[in-house]
Image (cartoon, grey):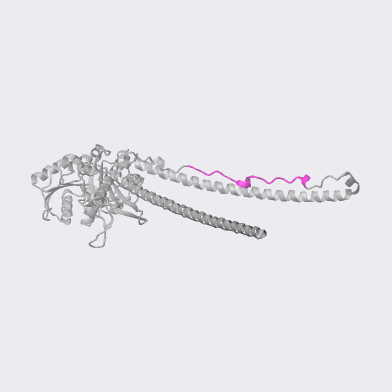
Amino acid sequence: MARRRVLAGSLAQMQREAARAQLAQVKLVEQQRRAAERALRARERALAANERELKRLYAEERTAEVDEMNRRLDDEVAALESILAATLEVDDHLDIETLKQPVHLPKFTPGALAKPEPSPHLDSFLPSPPSALGRIFGKAKHEAAALEGKRRYEEAVDAHARAEADRLSRLAAAQADHERHVAKLRGEIEAQHQEIDQFKQEFERGEPDAIVSYFTLVLEASLYPEGFPQRFRLAYVPESRQLVIEYEMPSIEVIPQTKAYKYVKARDEITQSTRPASHIKSLYASVLTQLTLRVLHEVMEADKAGYVETVVFNGYVETIDKATGQPARPYLITLRTTRPVFEALDLSRVDAAACLRHLNASVSKSPSELAPVKPVLEFNMVDPRFVQEADVLSELDQRPNLMELSPKEFESLITNLFTAMGLEAKLTQASRDGGVDCVAYDPRPIFGGKVVIQAKRYKGTVGVSAVRDLFGTMQNEGASKGILVTTSGYGAASFEFANGKPLELIDGSNLLYLLAEHAGLEAKIQPPTGWKDPLVEF
């Protein structure tokens, strides 16, 4: 009985321990499950935090990208707004000497050819001295090895001599090639220097082609924002010391159509707002007016030699006529100004548009619509092809010389020219100094009317008094316009007086062009030996 009780107690104890062990196992499993869940939640939180961080960094990157796009856009607009200001701190004068190519002749670098191979040494071919035992039993063998070493040494000496001769030959050939190359470079540089020296001499002599080339280099050196064509033509009229510039201006596409960029995080998209049409038009008009003043400034500042007294600027745009589909080049700005008038300006403080009005420029009323203006002087009228200089071949030139015509012939020529140009021209009684006075009528309604034409066959510059006299005659005659034609040219004072008045000044090169273009007459202007301008003017 007692034994059964002991056994029953032991069994109960075992059952209790098993139950406790099972409970502990259950608790352990539960703890492990909870730990796993906590780890999973921690991992999910970490992944979520990492994803949020990646999204934040991505959004910051896209925002920075948009900020950079807006910065570049602002810089682009700022550059357009400062077209004129950007050149005022630059010295536009061109020192012709700086055009010479620097003399940088390469040095001769022979490389490995300059290093001879080491001469062979006999010791390296001979066997090592024999040991004491070898001197007794291996003497014959050592002597044979020594003879073989000497033989190989002699072969090496011979091979070294041939190799050295070949090296010296190739070194001499390389040096000769280098000297020929240097001589060629030196010749090219000397030829380029001579060309620049000749250009400088021609420029200092005031030759028109050299003057045009000089100002071409000046304008080509000017740096503009992207989209500016920077194409132009120049002509120089020495009689009037007048530089005529026909300059291609940028189209309205040079103005950014975008006002600003924005990053929309919700759609992960970069959007852009459109610049108002009014701002595009006003900025474009500002660019054109600034560009005009900039070109004039660069020419005037670069002219240290004082060749230019008067500048004509015609600014045009290459486009397609929407009505015809054909290429067109409407002129948007045109003006003529003189050095004294322009140099009196403080360009750092002017409003470009107001400044052009002060200069009596003709500016398109709607540049964005390419509304054209009439150039104050057609470029073709001063095309260098029509400007002829006297030379040794002049006797072979069969073209009529305007300076050799009789007063009556010259009168008829001028009358026929303006008749061919569409005016109803009639001669008047010749003036006292043998010149031509002609009254013409422009039959066009509104723009037409009476035109007083006066001509002067001069060799020297026509004085401003002649322009004043023409203006007085025009007023006395009740004419709507006065035209002064000369075989020579005009000074700055004449252009200043005529500026803003219904006066047209036609110089010698203009006259030659008009005769060729409208009367089909190829003429020349060459004062005969001993020619003297009349002392009395009309």
- On the rendered image, what quadrant is the N terminus found in? bottom right
Tell me: 16 left or right of 512. Answer: right
Looking at the image, the residue that sits furthest to the right is 136
Dominant secondary structure (helix, strand or loop) of the stretch shown in magenta: loop
Q: Which residues are magenta?
A: 103-124
- On the rendered image, what quadrant is the C terminus found in? top left
Q: In this orientation, which residue lies closer to the viewer: 466 or 271?
A: 271
Residue 417 sits in quarter: bottom left
Q: Position of residue 282 (x, y in %)?
A: 24, 49
Q: Position of residue 501 (x, y in %)?
A: 15, 44
Q: Residue at x 24, y 53 (%)?
A: 277
In magenta stretch: residue 330: no
Q: In this orientation, which residue lies closer to the viewer: 193 or 77?
A: 77
In magenta stretch: residue 121: yes
Q: Position of residue 345 (x, y in %)?
A: 24, 38
Q: In this orientation, which residue lies closer to the viewer: 102 or 315?
A: 315
